[in-house]
Image (cartoon, rainbow, N blue to C red):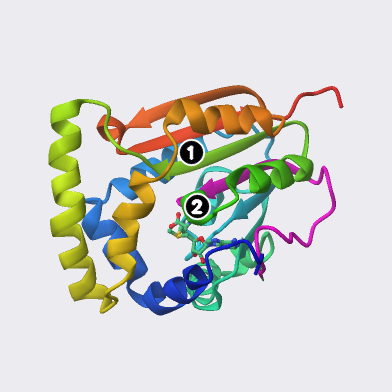
């Protein structure tokens, strides 16, 4: 693991892995599926594209890509062995096996050549990374010129009243449900904290630009509780 990262993140995901999907569906009222599908619909790729899905977790982004772009090759990386083993179970079908690969690796230490991917995706992972800009910079080098980066992250609603109500749910109700189902005291207290401390959408977009991406745009979804960030590596080197 990158020595700058929070040491407990990996352990946390190892411990909640087996309840992760259930909690995602419950706590988001199944909106998480719609959000990932939107990310995949925004991919601007050819049928035979190579895609890197960073912080793949249990493989939901890869499965959504597989459903919408049947001939792409998808490389999934995550540093949680338990999360990835659940991804492998989902992927396990003869047709998927041919084109979806999984690696237990740190996002800061990618086992791929530079300029290898047509697109890089990352859903709900960058919030957990301390050195966000450093990671964006490293991902930039793995995207081909003209290729895309698509990042999905939980964010806070902009409307004040909505934000207050959401924070109430997020700080009180969500940790209680999360703790009950996942049996982890820490994970679902950490979740709201990590979302609250995530940069604003303009600030995060600026980080993407500083890392080299252009045409950076963000799309708030479900009243702004999730945001899709999209950028492109310039065609000229
Ligand atoms: C909230 S989950 C998201 C999983 C999946 N992308 C999804 O859409 O449900 C965050 C994932 O990021 C992984 N992760 C966090 N930091 C990482 C890092 N530095 N390198 C690799 N994986 C990381 C965790 O192990 C976890 O599986």
Distance CA(mark 2)–CA(mark 1): 8 Å
Check mark 2 vs ligand 1: CB closer than 8 Å? yes or no. yes
Q: Are marks 2 and 1 in contact (CB under 8 Å)?
A: yes
> From the viewer's perspective, is residue 218 above or below residue 82?
above
Q: Is residue 115 on the magenta stretch?
A: yes
Label 2, secondary structure: give it. helix
Label 1, secondary structure: give it. helix
Q: Toward which corner of the image does residue 77 lie, by quadrant?
A: bottom right
First to last magenta residue range: 104-124
* Residue 181 location (% of width, % of height): 22, 74
* Residue 30 location (% of width, % of height): 26, 51
Residue corresponding to mark 1:
39
Q: Toward which corner of the image does residue 225 lie, by quadrant?
A: top left
Please name the residue shown 45% across and 35% down the image: 228
Badge 2: residue crowd in 10 Å (few <14, some 14–19, many ≥20): many
> Which quadrant is the N terminus positioned in?
bottom right
Predominant secondary structure, magenta span:
loop
Residue corresponding to mark 2:
61
């Amino acid at each position: 693991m990158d020595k700058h990262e929070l040491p407990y993140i990996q352990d946390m995901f190892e411990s909640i892995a087996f309840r992760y999907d259930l909690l995602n569906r419950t706590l988001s009222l199944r909106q998480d599926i719609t959000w990932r599908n939107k990310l995949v619909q925004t991919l601007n790729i050819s049928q035979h594209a190579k895609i890197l899905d960073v912080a793949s977790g249990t493989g939901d982004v890869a499965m959504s890509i597989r459903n919408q772009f049947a001939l792409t090759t998808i490389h999934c990386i995550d540093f949680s062995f338990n999360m990835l083993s659940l991804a492998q179970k989902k992927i396990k079908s003869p047709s998927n096996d041919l084109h979806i690969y999984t690696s237990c690796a740190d996002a800061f230490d990618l086992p791929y050549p530079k300029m290898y991917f047509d697109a890089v995706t990352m859903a709900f992972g960058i919030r957990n990374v301390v050195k966000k800009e450093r990671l964006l910079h490293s991902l930039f080098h793995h995207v081909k010129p003209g290729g895309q980066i698509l990042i999905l992250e939980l964010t806070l609603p902009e409307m004040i009243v909505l934000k207050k109500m959401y924070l109430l749910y997020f700080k009180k109700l969500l940790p209680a449900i999360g703790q009950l189902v996942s049996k982890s005291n820490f994970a679902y207290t950490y979740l709201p904290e990590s979302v609250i401390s995530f940069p604003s959408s303009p600030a995060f977009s600026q980080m993407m630009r500083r890392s080299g991406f252009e045409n950076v745009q963000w799309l708030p979804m479900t009243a702004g509780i999730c945001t899709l960030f999209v950028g492109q590596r310039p065609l000229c080197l």
